[in-house]
Image (tube, coloured by chain):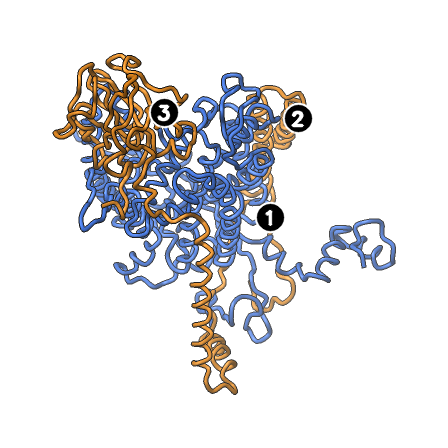
Amino acid sequence: MSDEQHEPRAPLPVATLDDPQLQFSAKHPRRIENLISLSFLLGMICMGGFGAAFWQNWKPWTLGATLGAGMLFLGFGVISWGKYLMPQGPFVEERHVLASTEAERDAMAGAIVERGTVVVRSRRMMLGLLGGALGVFSIVAIIPLRALGNLPKTTLTKTNWRRGSLVVDSNGRPVHRDDLQPGGLLTVFPAGYETNEQTQAVDQTVLIRPQSDNLVTEPGRDTWAPDGYVAYSKVCTHLGCPVGLYEEELKILVCPCHQSIFNVLDGAVPKFGPAPRPLPQLPLYFDGSGYLRAQDGYDQPIGPGYWERS
Amino acid sequence: MPLAIGKPRTKREAKAAQGPYGRLGSVIGELDDRLGIAKGGRTFLDKIFPDHWSFMLGEIALYSFVILMVTGVYLTLYYVPSTAEVIYHGVYAPLRGTRVTEAYASTVNLSFAVRAGLLMRQMHHWAADVFLGSIVIHMARIFFTGAFRKPRELNWTIGMTLMLLSLANGFIGYSLPDDLISGTGIRILYSIVLSIPLVGSYLAFFIFGGSYPGNEIIPRLFIIHVLVLPVILAALIGAHLFLLVRQKHTQFPGKGKTEHNVVGSPMFPTFIAKTTGFFFMVTAVLALLGGLAQINPIWQFGQYRPDKISYAVQPDWYMGWLDGVLRIMPSWEFTGFGHTIPFEVFLPAVVFPGIIFTLCFGWPAIERIFTKDTAIHHLLDRPRDRPKRTAAGAAVIALLFTCFGASATDVLANFFNVSLNVVLWTFRVLVFVVPILAGFITWKICLELQHGGTGLGQRKRAMVVSRTAAGEYVAVPADVRPGDERHEIDAVPVPTHIDLDDGSVEVGAGNTRPDADGVRRVIR
């Protein structure tokens, strides 16, 4: 690069067969070109095959295989062309220094500072007011976000289980005293709320009959599990997954998401894993016709913890 | 005047078409008249790309993104973002007559009844996994070679933002089919948002449009997935590449490579050919994966129901570290003063990734605190020459992959037939031990490698040990084997400046002059 050079700068050298990286094509004239041509031809055939598979609606794997093989051949051909028949250099290019001169930097800063202050006296105050107005706007602009959803209020603390709620399965069938054999398990809901996804999410309760006589899981819960029918909220207290695995032999409920383990006989106290609290227990009783009902709703919010939960 | 692509109609056109480069020359002439492309375009065609293989990792990400866009558009033609319930009447017999949402039904439908639908959906899913994978490996290359140093801190930040948004969009994407596994993921997301102190329940309700699950979340996630995040991603990718061209590539040290040049092959035709071929290759791999390797068979998982769950629930690989750390966290819920802070969720799912991402985003600044290095760097470090940085990176990667392993506690317990308890406690220990060990071993290896340094890119000569008649052992260098004499080729200079009469320079930033070594420097 000479200093006398003015108009268009010199072209990049064209690849010659003397270049070390082109030795292969120099030694085997046309071999590379034939290989690349063959690759493109095979690519073309595969692409045709892809078209045929698409047109005929063949099985998905034929689509993937033809498209993939076609692209593979095209890629192989184009890369070989670039690698064996094009100038590799190495060429060296100078970097420009990105930084400008001090004078240019000062000129830019000066342009920003000075141009705006020619005849203005109270620029600071006006800018302050403009900033304030934009600040108020940005706060006000948050208000529409309020429409994104309801406020939580007490939603998180409530389920649809009430005093006397009839216990039904997902098909709305009430659960009779004789329905579950010892060892049996059923997911239940309060009658009237069993088909709605929204209520299922909070009301889902796992009904287990680990034994056939009354079960006292905790002191003070003497009547909660008549004939061994015990019911716990199915919403894991860790992250809200349904606690869906019941291990009959060990009488434990396992959450498949993060492996929290709850002891069914012992008030569903977590024995293992990240769950912080027992699954709330639903107190049950049999009505006059022998159907299961809730003595009351849950005595605490179900599911994972949150700030407002006391 | 119309572009002279057709038959020449005027004398001028005819003359132009007869120039040394014929019609192409005249097209360039007409474009140059209007847009002034010749000079800059030529500079662009001459742009030099370093030849090192590790520079193509980012290309994998770029091309996966292209495939994501193409296959994604195909999917939007058939996917219905709605949780309205319908009775399934499609071609997949086992589901017929069941109550499903439109989102789920349309996803099953586009998999089975739409031509190439399954291929497109599986390519899309694989491309997302490959996209995130290549981003992470690309980022590791940038990190370990110090390519993030001045002047490239901004591009590191853009890259990190790209990774974070891609992570989010990947999670959102696999949540859209509303199948049993993805629905469980959304449920977990809801609980994680809920765990944030003070504002958690409000945030959760605003995101989900009320209490869980609501009917809003799928349409909301859809518009974020197909419009908001892709537009931001595309814009940031544009900025990422613009900065790359503006600042030019970094390069590994080697013969003829300095802080003031770039050595490699030119944009046209060599790099264009190689990278186009590479695009075909990436597409090929994704097409083969999409056609031959099943991924996310949602028809087997079934429709999401809030009270249903399947065994071995795991997210896509790039969310695995978060799931793992949620599993091994002890149950430290705080209750008091009338409030609950679920630390067993908030720490692993919000604070932990917050720390990891802050570390990653801030690394250029953090490193500068220790090195006090404010110089501009275009030559890359060898990882061994920066043992502390390399060790720190290895430790963080080891930590994240240990967490990733912990997301399979149940599968591992089953597979090795050991108790879940043992696996869990093993990971609780490993998550502290492995990063420390990995960091220490990496540091030691770096120091060892520094001592064994021969010339870069050269193979060590073999030594032949033989015993003399006197019983003495001597080591003699073996004959040169093929490959030993590997030499690096002298680079051919590309002229980059048009010098004016007074020796100053017209193009480039500011006024530069060659110094005594022939290196151009800004005139101060």
Numbered disc 2: what chain?
A
Closer mark to the observer between disc 2 and disc 1: 2
Q: What secondary structure is marked by label 2?
A: helix
Q: Which disc number belongs to residue B268?
A: 1
**Nearest the camera: B451 or B92?**
B92
Please name the residue shown 43% across and 72% down the image.
Answer: A132
Whichever of labels 1 and 3 marks the residue nearer the N terminus, that label is 1
Closer to the camera, A246 or B395?
A246
Q: Are marks 2 and 1 on the same chain?
A: no
Query: Marks 1 and 3: CB-CB under 8 Å?
Result: no
Q: Look at the picture and state if B35 lies above or below B90.
A: below
Judging by the rendered image, the residue that carries numbered circle 2 is: A51
- Is B15 left or right of B330, judged from the image as shown? right
Q: Which mark is residue B310?
A: 3
User: Residue B50: percent from the left, percent from the top?
Assistant: 48, 48
Spot the blue chain and give its letter. B
Label 1 resides on the chain identified as B
Can residue B25 be seen in the rendering of this structure? yes
The quadrant of the picture occupied by the N terminus of chain B is bottom right
Q: Real-space Cα distance between discs 2 and 3? A: 39 Å
Task: Specify the colour of chain A.
Answer: orange
